[in-house]
Amino acid sequence: MARTKPAYQCGSCGASHSKWSGQCTDCGEWNVIEEIAPARQDRRGGWTGSGNTAVVALSSVTSGEEPRVPSHIAELDRVLGGGIVEGSVILIGGDPGIGKSTLLLQMLATVAQHSNLYVSGEESAGQIALRSRRLGLEAPHLRLLTETSVERIIEVLARERTRLAVIDSVQTLFSDNLQSAPGSVGQVRESAARLVRFAKTSGTTIFLVGHVTKEGALAGPRVLEHMVDTVLYFEGDPGGRYRILRAVKNRFGAINEIGVFAMSESGLREVGNPSAIFLSRHEAPVSGSVIVVTREGSRPMLVEIQSLVDESHLANPRRVSVGLDQNRLGMLLAILHRHGGIPMVDQDVFVNVVGGVRVTETAADVAVVLAALSSFRDRPLPADLVVFGELGLAGEIRPVPNGQERLAEAETHGFRYALVPGANAPRSSSGKLKVLTANRLIEAIDHLRSLE
């Protein structure tokens, strides 16, 4: 057979090119031309397609609950929305050494199916076997395949009738239809597209392991995240102990759901009560420390926010935040100055979320402001106080969703006081948790004076 001539396309404007060049002649953008898989012609001169082309009425389509297979790892099932959906494609990314391959190897060992397959393009079978023995995994049913050609991988998956497969990693795969090297944008996109088509037609569940860039995003084309059904990210310091698995896209469940794991000698261990590990109870009250009740997916979680305010010797004082949006920190300090009467224009402000957690919701606004105020005045807040609420530019404290569940979580861990927005006040009090309400920032500051 004659070798198919490669085709190239501009990733910015979509113009077609006969060969690669540094600049697109249509739109003028640089370094946007990528190799694509050439389209195939059938004998009639038309273009081949896939799937059923029949038109059906929406009312005639029967919808039912997607069948799920439990992974027997509770935190992974929570992130996936209740289990593994048959025929789905899950993309999992994270920094090198954070535990992606370890988690998937443990999952394949716990899911007792004789048709599971671990496909590795980065490690040999001997290396995977050594890691399995080091983790103490006993999986006689688990089978291995070391291959990087996506055509041969699909052939093996179809021949073996594999129901659950792990591809580690998608950056090592290549297609014979492209001449570019493995890991290039065209190869990653074409390999992922072929695996997705195979999963949808055969019902095989495929886990794709993806590398991340220095900015923390998945390496390769952005369209890769749109092809798959679920995108999971591993977060945490590779040198630390705890890992957070976060869902940023899930067609079969809720997004922003997290699973917490602890790295041990026997692999990743589930953490059923993450609030206990993220709370570092001090022997004596310290200034700049506030406990906030945040919410990740369907789980309320207690997190400690620490702040350090110190006199600045620079022309532009520093505003540093770890685990929070730095731009929002500057806005909250401006609100504290305008509506609280406390200027920090000559102070360096550092804010950190303990435990490596990343808080994205606005319910931590009041906690950040009170932590900075506590450090600025060097007055500790009560150790049995929790805070949550969103802060507006007019100085108002706005309610946050699921306030009752947040209060119940705080009461479970033995807290005595809770400072919440007025609209989140409970309808009835159990007497164990004293709830203080505030509708303005100045009211929250006055409540702190009464608790000192």
Image (cartoon, grey):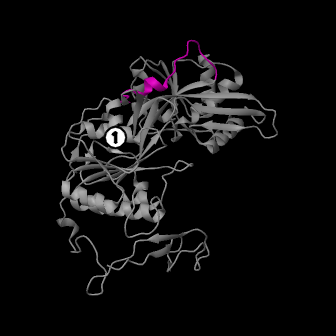
Q: Give above or below for 355 relative to 115.
A: above
| Magenta stretch contains residue 285 | yes
Quadrant for the C terminus in the image? top right
What SS does tag 1 mark?
A: helix
In the image, what residue occupies the spot 78% across and 40% down?
316
- Residue 87, how many percent across, how many down? 25, 54
> Can you give x and y, in whole percent of width and height, for residue 343 in the image?
75, 34
Q: Is residue 393 visible?
A: no
Q: Residues within 10 Å of mark 1 (few under 14, many from 20)?
A: few
Which residue is nearer to you in this view: 67 or 307?
67
The x, y position of residue 8, in whole percent, is 48, 75
Quarter residue 73 falls in = top left
Tell me if residue 132 can be seen: yes
Q: Toward the viewer: 102 or 216?
A: 102
Question: Which segment did they paint magenta?
Answer: 269-287
Residue at 21% across, 58% down: 158
In the picture provided, is 379 more to the left or to the right than 180? Answer: right
Which one is in front, 316 or 44?
Answer: 44
Q: Amino acid at mark 1?
A: Gly
Determine which residue is flagged by label 1: 126
Q: Quadrant of residue 321?
A: top right
Q: Position of residue 407 (x, y in %)?
A: 43, 27
Q: Main secondary structure of the magenta part?
A: loop
Q: Quadrant of the N terminus?
A: bottom left
Is residue 214 covered in magenta?
no
In-image side of 430 versus 369 (left or right): left
